[in-house]
Image (cartoon, rainbow, N blue to C red):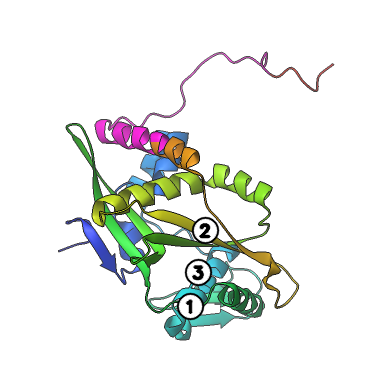
Amino acid sequence: MSLGDEVGLFYDVPDEEYHGLKIPSNSSIRKFAELPALYELEYLKHEEDEGMTQAFQMGKVFEVLVLEPHKAIQIVTFSTKTYDSKEAVGCVGPQRIPIAAQDLPKVEQWAKCMLERYPFNAETKKQVTGIVDFEFGEKKVRAKIRMDEVDFENRIIYDYKLMRAIDPEQFEKDAWEKGYDTQNALYCKAMDILAPGDPWKFVFRVQMKHPYGFDTRFTTKYWFNTESIEKAWSHVSMQLQIMASTTAYRGYREGCLSTERFKWGRG
């Protein structure tokens, strides 16, 4: 049986297996809303490895140190500064988490800050994958979620973010641009189905990429109000229904454009 054949909660699902499952997720829903043709290219047909980026690898190592410290033995370093060098690419492999040697001490410091503010909880589940069917009348859409940490007793989903700026205004901006609100809505609705009971809550635990050494003043948490979550779910549910009913992933169409709506900045 393969991942996605059945609904439910699954643990220790390898990254390649999760990302290889071609069903809607928060990131693919966002891409579909931007342009369905890109969704088809990037999520339905694309098979090749995109390569490493500094931000992604630092975030991956950060999550391992905070949530799964027993996997720290999988962290391997390379001496070059760039993540596309021959040495860096040579570090890629199963159960290996590459990171530049110069970046690892900073990530270790940030992980210590996070754990000082929010200590490791051995009772919660880490890296939980959910496969869920959303029903909209006669339509049924299967989707996937991956949660950093799940507190089943208190019904809270925790998501960890490593960011350059974490002040409230910047987080709100990033939430809008990167779909943190839709992530919240999708995950909570999915868990309401997979683990019914009182409504699930969602909390972002955020660490700033600061250069100041050990300092927990740059570690905080955020959550969305009910109105924001309801609006986000309205958007997500609409996109899921459209995705379920179309196979015509069109690109841009020809048309005459106008700059009339841009009134500012021109004399």
Q: Which mark is residue 120?
A: 1
Residue 9 found in image quarter: bottom left
For the N terminus, the quadrant is bottom left
Q: Which mark is residue 63?
A: none
- Is residue 43 visible to the viewer in this orientation of the structure? yes
Is 189 drawn above or below residue 206 in the view shown? above
Looking at the image, is mark 3 or mark 2 nearer the viewer? Answer: 2
Q: In front here: 7 or 248?
A: 7
Tell me the number on the disc at residue 204.
2
Q: Above or below — where is 186 with respect to 206?
A: above
**Residue tagged 3:** 60
Q: Residues within 10 Å of mark 1 (few under 14, many from 20)?
A: some
Q: Secondary structure at mark 1?
A: loop
Is 244 colored magenta in this rendering?
Answer: yes
Q: Earlier in the sequence, mark 3 or mark 2?
A: 3
Magenta stretch?
234-261
Q: Residue at x 81, y 19 (%)?
A: 266
Q: CA distance from mark 1 to mark 2?
A: 15 Å
